Amino acid sequence: MTDPVLALNSKPLYVFALVLILVSGILTCAYAQPPEFKISGSVNGSAIGYGVSGIPARRDPFYWLVSSNLTLSYWKITAPLTFTVSQQDHTFRYPQPFNQFGISPKYKSVTFHIGYRSLNFSEFTLAGTIFMGGGVEVAPPNGSVKVSAMYGRLAKARLVGGINDLEFGIPSFERWGYGTKVTLGKNGQEVDFIVFRGRDDPSSIDAASAARLGITPAENFVSGLNVRRNLSKRVNLNVEYALSAYTKDIRDPEQDAEYTYANYLGGLYTPRISSQFNSAFQGQLTYRAEKYQLNAKYRRLGPEYKTMGSPFMNNDFEDISGGAASAFFQNKLNVSVNAGVQRNNLTNTQEARQTRFIGSINTSITASDRLNITLSYSNFNSTTTQTRFFQQSQVGIIDSLLYLQVTNNFTAGASYSLQQGAITKSIVLNSNYQVASDNQNNNSVFYNANAGYVVNMTAKDLSINTNMNINSNRVAGLENISAGPTLSASKMLMEKKIRTTFSSSYIQTYQMKELTSSNITARLGGSYTTKTKHTFGIDLSWLHRVGTVASMGSFSEFRGGVTYNYSFSN
């Protein structure tokens, strides 16, 4: 029997064309007299050149890109349309914003998704992963039943990867999936039932190449239950639970269903010797009063919990946290406090167990109409216990090793504004200080300070910004410092048809008080907007580094580009 996940994997464009024809037919037959067709949004194009001397090139010498963000309107249907086309490498495992298209026509409470789209069922099932395929959402505004469904390709087959890949060049089989979410209830009393299935196509990569690369075709089935309930006017409860069945190699022999969960899946999932069953849970309780808010949250992800609907997910941990927020003095002082604890190695199968304690406090102060102040402090304590540390000096003795780390972080900011007629002047100060230490006498200290002065001349359409920035990072007695000024300005000309911008910075870096390099950057940009929806732009940037030590070479780098934008009106 053909697997339903892979049945259409070689015909995604046929699916796209079929749905598009269906939607077009509905539109055409809707009225005897065709309604007005409207387009809003914009289409953009850019071409960028690149040159470098002193180091190997860090990108192609020429790059072009065409993209759009449009909304098509016809009768009672609106259809957001996006596409991106470039010569950028498009062999990434997970779909990237290169050479993509997508449209989501909506009629009343029904929305279709065609092309490169994403849906979010829940954090533990399908979590916004971009797929190439189709989907539908039916969500009546006052209805008690809502339905979402999708089918499409989650990943491309790939033998090698590139440096721009999200997974840094990990080979993979072609991956397809489908899923649905049914929501019952309304007005804060809702329950979601979720099913998601993904499967790799073992024929997308030949067996010899797969064996050489050490990859195997996998399969995944996830079921989820979400509950959102207003316990009272002030108390809300959110609960999410998911159970995932994950097979690392679908070519493994079948295994007798020793799991009760698998006995009810029928042909949707076949347990094999490499199958794993793990669960994920989180619950949050919130209390909202007029002047304060309280919340408590618990999360637990089982060891090796995975879902093909979210390629990047931590697992094997649980945490509990709580917080409070309130406002004082007619909302001039806002304070929020959060604290929590997290631990991993839930089943004691790892060699180390780590416990983390986190606490933070954030405040914002509106001292006057001109002065605003923000302050925050966070404390991060981490304890790692090496439960299987082997003492070589005493053969056969298992001991434990305790590692403690404490990180304190403090940030402060202030802004003061003064208006004098059509001129606004602002002073902005920001600083950050972080210190980390452990019981192995390892210490690191980082701080950053920034002072800026901004002048906005409304009558002259001119803005000038100057700032001074300094960074210091000291680890194991070795200190690195970078510091320097930045100047930027923008000016509108010809009744705001032309916008010009310029910025430049001079940054020096030091290691142990010795100058290692000087860096000069400059950027010049301009754009011209016509009366007929056209905008033409130019952007030039230059970076020059002068190394003063043997390990820091000198080089110059240039980027120059032109852009074009056409805006549609309603």
Image (tube, rainbow, N blue to C red):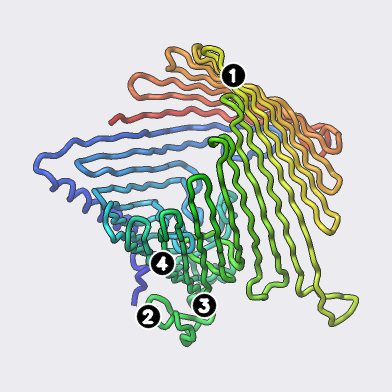
Q: Which residue is mark 4?
A: 196
Identify the residue at image location x=32%, y=55%: 13
Category of crowding for the residue at label 4, using alpha-carbon neighbours closer than 10 angstroms: few (below 14), some (14–19), many (at least 20)? many
User: In whole angstroms, how far apart are the C-alphas of marks 2 and 4?
Assistant: 15 Å
Q: Mark 3 or mark 2: which comes first in sequence?
A: 2
- Report the disc number at residue 418: 1
Q: Quadrant of residue 18?
A: bottom left
- Give the x, y percent position of residue 181: 36, 63
* Marked residue nearer the N-terminal end (1 or 2): 2
Residue at coordinates 59% horizontally, 69% vertically from top-left?
214
At label 1, counting other C-alpha atoms closer than 10 Å, the crowd grade (few under 14, some 14-19, many 20 or more) is some
Kindly identify which residue carries mark 3.
Answer: 275
Closer to viewer: mark 1 or mark 2: 1
Q: Point out residue 456 in the picture as x, y percentages from the top left corner.
A: 55, 18
Q: Secondary structure at mark 3?
A: strand
Secondary structure beneath label 4: strand
Left or right, 476 with respect to 500, comes to right
